[in-house]
Image (cartoon, coloured by chain):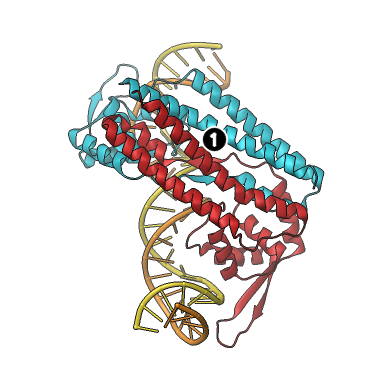
Chain colours: A cyan, B red, C yellow, D orange
DNA sequence: TTAACCATGTAAAAAGTTACATGATTGT
DNA sequence: ACAATCATGTAACTTTTTACATGGTTAA
């Protein structure tokens, strides 16, 4: 699933502008293409050219005109096909492991404080993740099943972080006598 | 830690060629810059220009000449500094979650078979990961501590996959009555 | 004879991030 | 006054992946 497919999913859920999409991408950390993501505007133009979305221009008094997009029939079909493909394997980029890899040049106390520093970073991220799950954003909840699924997706991030913490604890314990 | 720093780590461990480095990057899945990675040659030239590595050209009868690199004093220093920086947060790219996100358009049996298909993929990856850990490649084991650390790094991949499997099982259980 | 290995590199394309650019409005 | 929000886009840059390019050797 690439960026365009995910956008298609949102626009199949409800009509919205590029600006609103940007906000959603920012909030949902499990989506790649985060940060200051203006490729969305380019994608929308592309999707429209392919006939997968259609737009409606809404003039406003005080703000610039909105371009409100929604998925077309063809867009829904394309989304359906994309969802059914076999998901790619999860790719993880763990910078901590790269540090650990060459940590032999560190003294023991330096190594332990590196681990401690990273661990507290992960703990902070976990707390933030839980907080975000608690006051969850507006999510598609068209059915009970969908509501459950989005709950699980939000949960997943915390699971991963907890797993990382477990690893760090194991690591420290193993290091204590070395 | 960027590509050049990781290369520096290898060359601080022992002298080797770009070709050998390529092989190691391919084997170690926790390293980004995998696959057919020829940027290594460019990096080596760059590192040499910066005086962080030095090369020795070894002529061979039947094969092309080898350029054997090793880290310089300055290279070791740079590596040391890089290792001490606070590691970046782990970034995960989970394509399965993107599928799940818009799986509302699937019938229940379609959803379950999507999950099953992905699960068996993860199971295969886990088996492969364990197999790789069993007959581990030549790793730096300059000290007992380093040997332990590389063991843990290899372990980490399996941990992550197992965690993903646990998530999938939880998901299926939760879906059974929806 | 075909694939894998040894050994080096260049080039192009794709994907992703960051910065630039504009400009009114609303809340602290 | 300053930051954040609303709203759209372009441009440049960095990173990563894929393909091209060469050419001998060794093992199944």
Which residue occupies the extreme left position in the image? A73
Inspect this view and state whether residue B52 appears.
no
The image shows residue B46, relative to residue B106, as above or below, that is below
Q: Position of residue D26 (x, y in %)?
A: 52, 83
Q: Position of residue B95 (x, y in %)?
A: 41, 41
In the displayed structure image, the side of residue B62 where residue A3 appears, left or right: left
Q: Nearer the viewer, residue A92 or B154?
A: B154
The image shows residue A106, relative to residue B164, as above or below, that is below
The image shows residue B25, relative to residue C21, as above or below, that is below
The residue that disc 1 covers is: A160
Inspect this view and state whether residue B163 appears.
yes
Picture quadrant where residue B41 is located: bottom right
Q: Secondary structure at mark 1?
A: helix
Q: Position of residue C9 (x, y in %)?
A: 52, 71
Picture quadrant where residue B46 is located: bottom right
Q: Position of residue B80 (x, y in %)?
A: 74, 52
Q: Nearer the viewer, residue B58 or C5?
A: C5
Classify the position of the C terminus of chain B by image quarter. Answer: top left
Q: Residue at x 69, y 50 (%)?
A: B149
Q: How many marks?
A: 1
Q: Nearer the viewer, residue B98 or A168?
A: A168
Q: Residue at x 29, y 26 (%)?
A: A13
Q: Residue at x 65, y 42 (%)?
A: B87
Q: Name the chain letter of the residue that bears numbered label 1.
A: A
In the displayed structure image, the side of residue B104 where residue B8 appears, left or right: right
Query: Tag 1: Cα neighbours inside 10 Å, few (<14), some, or many (≥20)?
Result: some
């Amino acid at each position: 699933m690439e960026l365009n497919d995910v956008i298609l999913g949102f626009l199949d859920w409800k009509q919205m502008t590029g600006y609103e999409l940007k906000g959603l991408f920012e909030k949902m950390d499990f989506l790649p293409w985060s940060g200051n993501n203006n490729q969305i505007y380019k994608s929308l133009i592309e999707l429209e050219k392919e006939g997968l979305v259609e737009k409606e221009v809404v003039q406003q008094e005080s703000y610039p005109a909105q371009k409100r997009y929604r998925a077309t029939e063809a867009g829904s079909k394309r989304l359906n096909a994309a969802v059914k493909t076999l998901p790619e394997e999860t790719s993880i980029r763990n910078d901590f492991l790269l540090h650990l890899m060459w940590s032999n040049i560190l003294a023991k106390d330096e190594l332990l404080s590196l681990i401690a520093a990273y661990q507290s970073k992960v703990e902070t991220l976990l707390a933030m993740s839980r907080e975000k799950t608690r006051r969850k954003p507006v999510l598609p909840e068209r059915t009970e099943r969908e509501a459950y699924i989005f709950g699980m997706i939000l949960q997943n991030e915390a699971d991963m972080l907890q797993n990382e913490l477990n690893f760090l604890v194991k690591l420290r314990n193993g290091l204590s006598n070395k």
